[in-house]
Image (cartoon, grey):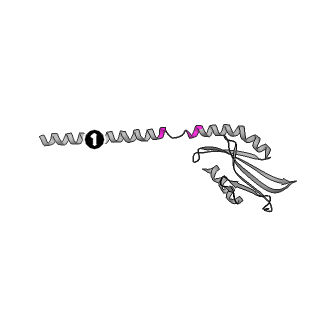
Amino acid sequence: MHGRMLEGMLKRATLLLLAANTMALGQKAQSENDHKPDTWQKMKDCAAQAERVGPGEAEINKGNYVNHYSPKYDRCFVKISWVIRQGEEIKGQGARLVDAFEHDTIALSQTTFPPSESKNVCFVPSGIVGCSEAKDFISEHMRN
């Protein structure tokens, strides 16, 4: 009889420990989620800020703009794109990546057709780079 009683107590104790462990894991996961940024709110704030920054920047460059909140970088970016024309002929294109809240140009890629070293201007935070590298940098920041 004592054996069955002891066995029952062990089962109850095991179940209690299992339940307590499960609850502790759930609380840990919940507390970790409590510290994650509110991505949806940041996206909304980014869109609102882009509406203040983008139109003026795009008008200066006679182009258009698009915004992106990047969870990876925890920043709001605005990409301003434009086409360089000579009359009706397209002579080049450009894109500039701007931090919407800081109003800083982060990267620039401006290329002419046919390519001209003297008229191509391309840079990223580390300095002057090839235009394909600058385009890739801008694309990656607008994607992630």
SS for dot 1 = helix
The residue at 47%/40% (across/down) is 33
The residue at 77%/47% (across/down) is 63
Q: Quadrant of residue 3?
A: top left
Q: 1 or 95, which lies in front?
A: 95
Q: Residue furthest right?
A: 87
Disc 1 residue crowd, few under 14, some 14–19, many 20+, Cα 10 Å? few
User: Is residue 35 a member of the stretch shown in magenta?
Assistant: yes
Q: Quadrant of residue 7?
A: top left
Give above or below for 35 relative to 89: above
| Coordinates of residue 131 in the picture (x, y in percent) | 71, 59
Q: Residue furthest left?
A: 1
| Coordinates of residue 111 in the picture (x, y in percent) | 76, 57
Q: 39 or 117, which lies in front?
A: 117
Q: Residue furthest front?
A: 127
User: Is residue 58 a member of the stretch shown in magenta?
Assistant: no
Give above or below for 113 relative to 101: below
| Coordinates of residue 44 in the picture (x, y in percent) | 62, 38
Q: Quadrant of residue 42?
A: top right
Which region is colored magenta?
A: 33-41
The residue at 20%/40% (across/down) is 8
The residue at 70%/55% (across/down) is 123
Q: Quadrant of the N terminus?
A: top left
Quickly name the residue at label 1. 15
| Coordinates of residue 99 in the picture (x, y in percent) | 67, 44
Query: What amino acid is found at the position of numbered circle 1 in the picture?
Result: Leu
